[in-house]
Image (cartoon, rainbow, N blue to C red):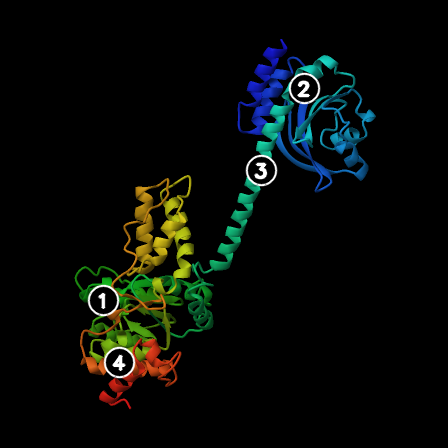
Amino acid sequence: MKKQFYYQATQCLCCSLSLESALKSYFEYVKQYLPIDGIFLNIYRPEHSDIQFLSHVNDNQAVALDKQVPISEKMEQLLQSNDRPVIRIINDIELDHVTSFVAPQVIPEIRSVILLRMVSSNTHLGVVGFYAKQAGQFKPLHADLIEPHKDTFSLITAFNLRGRNLLKANQQLSQENVNLKRAMFRADGVVGAQGGLKKVMEQVDAIAGLNTTVLMQGETGCGKEVIANAIHAKSNRANQPFIKVNCGAIPETLIDSELFGYEKGAFTGADSRKAGYFEQANGGTIFLDEIGELPLSAQVRLLRVLQNSSITRVGGYENVDLNIRVIAATHRNLQAMVQDATFREDLWYRLAVFPIEIPALRQRRSDIPLLVQHFIETISAKFNLEQLPRVSPEQLALLNNYAWPGNVRELINVIERAIIQQPQGPLCFDKLNPQSEEEVVTQTGETIIVDPTHASDKLVPLDIMIGKYINHALRITGGKLYGPGGAAELLDINPNTLKSKMKKLGLC
C-alpha cells in the first residue's frame, strides 16, 4: 500500500510545472488517506529573519502566496537546530512555539498539523504543512505515508523559487525598459528625443509656443513629419486642426483648388463650396511637406498667403482671413534651387524664419536600438503576434552598421519584411549591405558620410572645389595648418604638399 501511495502521490506532484496545480492534484489524492483540510508550503529566509508562505491549497482554492511573517531570534535558533526532526506531528499547535505564532497568521482555522521539513544541502529550506481544522487528527501512520515525499517537495520548491526569481528579474527588466522608454520616448512620441534628436527637440521646445514659421530640412524618410507633429503637440494650437499636405502629390492643375478651396460653380463639377487645406487648418497648423515640389506659379500664391494671412477661394472674390501656423519641410536644397531659379527667393526667406535640420539616421546611430524595439512592438501589434520576435546582438550590429539611405522609413520596411519572413523570430537582416558607397572610413576608423545628393547638378572646376574644401578645413582648425589637429592631418596629406596646393590655388 505504501509503495502504491508513494508512486501515485509522486505522479501528482510532478504533473505540472505550476506549483499550485501540482499541489492541488497532490491534495486531492492524499486527502483520501489523511484527515487533512489543506496543505501549505513555506520557506525560512534567514537573510530576512522571516518565513515566507509560497502556496496554499484546500477544497476551495489553490493559490500562490507572498506572505512574509517576521520571526524572533529565538525562533530562528529553533529552526536552525539540527535536533529538529524531519517530520513532526503537532496535534495541538499551541504546543509548538514557532508554529502557533506563524501558521495562524495565514490560516487562522488551523488546529493540528504534520510538518514535513524540506532540506537542501543540510540546510533547512522550509516546511510542507498538512493541516486539519480540528485538534488531535493525526497519527504516526499518516506521517509514515508522507515522509518519503520530502525530497520531491524540496525539488519542486527549489524549481518554483528559481522560477519566481526569474519572474522577478523579468519584471524588474520590464520596469527598467518602461523607465527607459519614458526617458527616451517623450509625450510627443519622438523616439530618441534624449538621444540623437536632442538638439532638434531643444529647437522644438524653443519654437513650439510661438507662431513663427518653421522650415524643416533633411533627407527623405528621416522623420520630418514626426517633428512637425511634436511642434504642433507642444504649441498652444494642440487642440486645433493639424492638416498635413504633401505638395508633391497634388497635380499642378489642382493645386489652387486643393490648397485654397473653391466656390460653387467655379468650374465644371464644383457643385458646392469646398474649403481648401489652408481653410481647414484655420486656428491650427498646416504642414506643407515637400515644399520644394511646388511649381513656381503655386509658390507665388503661397507667398501671398504668408504675407497677408488670407486666401481667396477659386472662383471667389472675398478674402478669408486665416490664423494658422505654417510648418514646411523638404529634402531638397532650397538654397541651390534659389540659385537655379526653380524656387522663389522671397518665399525662401518667408519660410526659413526658423530652420531645423533633421539628422539622417546614420548620423544618430545610438537611436537605432530604440527605433528597432519601437517598430517591432508596433508591427507585431499590427500583425496580432502573441510574442515579440527577438533580435540577436549580431543582427542588431548589422542594423547599426548599415548606411540607411532611406533613413527611418527604410528601417520600418526592413523590420516589417523581417517579421513577415520570421514572425516567431529571431529576425534576420543578413541581406543588408553594411556600407554604402557614400561612406568613407578614415585611418582612425571613423565613418564619415560623403553625400553628393545635396549638391546641385551644375558642376564647377575641380580646383575651385579643392580650394573651397581646404578653406573649410582651415576654418575648422582655426587656421592651423601643421601639427596635431591641423588641416594637413585632417585632410590626410603631407603639410608641404598641402602648402604647395594652396600656393597653386592662390590661397596663400
Front label number (2 vs 4): 2
Q: Earlier in the sequence, mark 2 or mark 3?
A: 2
Circle 2 sits on which residue?
Answer: 147
Q: Earlier in the sequence, mark 3 or mark 4?
A: 3
Camera-nearest residue between 24 and 330:
24
Q: Residue at x 67, y 15 (%)?
A: 145
Q: Which x, y percent locates residue 57?
A: 64, 25
Report the Cα–Cα distance between label 1 and label 3: 63 Å
Q: Residues within 10 Å of mark 1 (few under 14, many from 20)?
A: some
Q: Amino acid at mark 3?
A: Arg
Q: Say which quadrant the C terminus sits in.
A: bottom left
Mark carried by residue 255:
1
> Which residue appears at 35% of the width and 41% of the height?
423
Residue 8, image x, y percentages:
57, 15
- Which is more N-terminal, label 4 or label 2? 2
Q: Amino acid under label 2?
A: Glu
Tell me the kind of residue under disc 4: Glu
Q: Residues within 10 Å of mark 2 (few under 14, many from 20)?
A: some
List the residue tagged with mark 4. 345
